[in-house]
Image: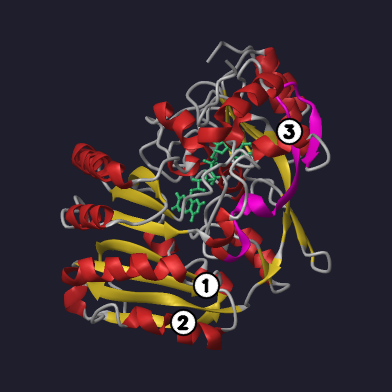
Amino acid sequence: MKQLQKANIDEFKAHFRGNVLLSGDAGYDEARQIWNAMIDRRPGLIARCASSEDVVQAVKFARKHDLLVSIRGGGHNIAGNAVCDDGLMIDLSLMKGIKVDSSARRATVEPGCTLADFDGAAQAHGLATPLGINSTTGVAGLTLGAGFGWLSRKYGMTIDNLLSADVVTADGSQVHASETENADLFWGLRGGGGNFGIVTSFEFRLHPVGPGVLSGLIVFPFDQAKSVLTQFARFTETMPDDLNVWMVTRKAPPLPFLPENVHGKEVVVLALCYAGDPTQGEKLIEPLRRFGTAHGEHVGVQPYTAWQQAFDPLLTRGARNYWKSHNFSRLSDGAIDTIIEYAGKLPSPQCEIFIGTIGGQTTRVAPEAMAYSSRDANYVLNVHGRWESAAEDGRCIAWAREFFAKSKPFASGGAYINFLTQDETDRIAFAYGATYNRLVALKKKYDPTNLFRMNQNIKPV
Ligand SMILES: Cc1cc2nc3c(=O)[nH]c(=O)nc-3n(C[C@H](O)[C@H](O)[C@H](O)COP(=O)(O)OP(=O)(O)OC[C@H]3O[C@@H](n4cnc5c(N)ncnc54)[C@H](O)[C@@H]3O)c2cc1C
């Protein structure tokens, strides 16, 4: 880090309501740790903001002293851009305010909120908006990268439900962005990641959901994978928007509804959620049970908030993670065969290949309506490399890369920016596709010096 004088730091602290942490301070090491244990960086300063005014102070301080800036929301992003070496980490995780206006079906959410925080507050009124499937993820990063989950087929991407945002821009101004105010910035925020400013408040549309939703898992033996995946591919092409079914293939965790001799063996898991009347849903999910002879299932009506947390035990922080992702408009035989081949040689017990099904409402928005343009993506495939020790890095990363390369010919183009690793800077233009040039122009307008560059960076040139 550029050598800052103690006096500079003291002056910054004097105008800052939250905490400023330096190496050696209590809480510094905890604050610099994020979900992916492969990222181990040491910021020169961590500014734990308590308010939007703190964010303004932090941005001005970084500009004045020419500091590298990273922005942390929930700290989940796989690429690890939430933390920088040396520079200033602007940590928003203490900003956790949420207001739900149940009669207007709107929520304002601060950028330190996790999905669990948001789901919990909205479900207190029987409401929700589409978010991801792991409740410890940050609302901020998820939303800015586009966001999808169980409700997306019915209600769209998370950004399709974003109504407005308060933003601190690179020059330290506070602006409001919506369809009618700073509409170009609002366009860019919806998928453009952290490139255009720091969002200090998000306003979302909410929908009636649950509180009980028909949801759960059906687990099939791996030797039935070809038949189960082929039927899954065709079934998901025509299922109604209320229903969502994802596929995960991995080694079976010790789930109580599975026979003990299946634990640790490769399995194919269908995870489902029906966002309408459970009685209707029961009829619709019946064919899934006949995709093969299941090892077991755990399906029933449970609180939406519980289902939103169902995968948390498998996705705890502290493991080493490396991801690769493709979009698919259709799952062809070639894609299915490649998935089965690589699921048959998982390099660690925690590695998995999953297909997140989107489609439905997510595809009914024009590709150039927002920064996120992959409106032809019906499936987002993620190869989730996950393991415990650095000694396994080479083997697990090689497996993920090899699978990614082999499955590429079957992909439909574009990529989900929130699933890119730090070594995929060459895929950013490809990920945005049709909207990339407009994003570059917008970056030039809102952040010409590229202050916000610790992200899937859109360069202002
Ligand atoms: C286990 C797991 C499961 C996931 N499941 C899903 C899923 O189901 N659906 C889905 O869509 N995604 C999913 N994701 C991906 C997730 O959306 C991204 O990792 C997202 O970036 C996480 O946001 P965060 O705030 O937690 O991350 P952070 O690492 O804190 O932030 C990510 C980046 O976003 C930017 N950023 C964060 N906050 C702000 C802000 N307030 N203003 C400006 N820029 C900001 C910064 O550039 C930062 O580097 C999952 C990730 C994990 C690890």
Q: Kindly indicate whether the residue at mark 2 contacts the one at mark 1 (C-beta within 8 angstroms).
A: yes
User: Which sits earlier in the primary sequence, circle 2 or circle 3?
Assistant: 3
Numbered circle sitting on residue 184: 3
Nearer to the camera, 303 or 188: 188
In terms of secondary structure, where does tag 1 sit? loop
Quarter of the image for residue 70 reads top right
Which region shows up in magenta?
154-178
- Write down the residue under mark 2: 284
Q: What residue type is labelled 3?
A: Asp
Q: Is residue 437 left or right of residue 161?
A: left
Q: Kindly indicate whether the residue at mark 3 contacts the one at mark 2 (C-beta within 8 angstroms).
A: no
Q: Which colour scheme is used?
A: secondary structure
Count residues near mark 1 (Cα–Cα under 10 Å), then give few for <14, some for 14-19, many for 20+: some
Residue for point 52% across, 55% down: 136
Q: In the rendered view, would you say 305 is above or below 200?
A: below
Q: Which amino acid does label 1 sit on?
A: Pro
Q: In the rendered view, would you say 443 is above or below 103?
A: above
Count residues near mark 3 (Cα–Cα under 10 Å), then give few for <14, some for 14-19, many for 20+: some
In terms of secondary structure, where does tag 2 sit? helix
Cα separation, mark 2 vs mark 3, equals 41 Å
- Write down the residue under mark 1: 240
List x then y, in percent, for residue 250.
26, 61
Cα separation, mark 1 vs mark 2, equals 9 Å
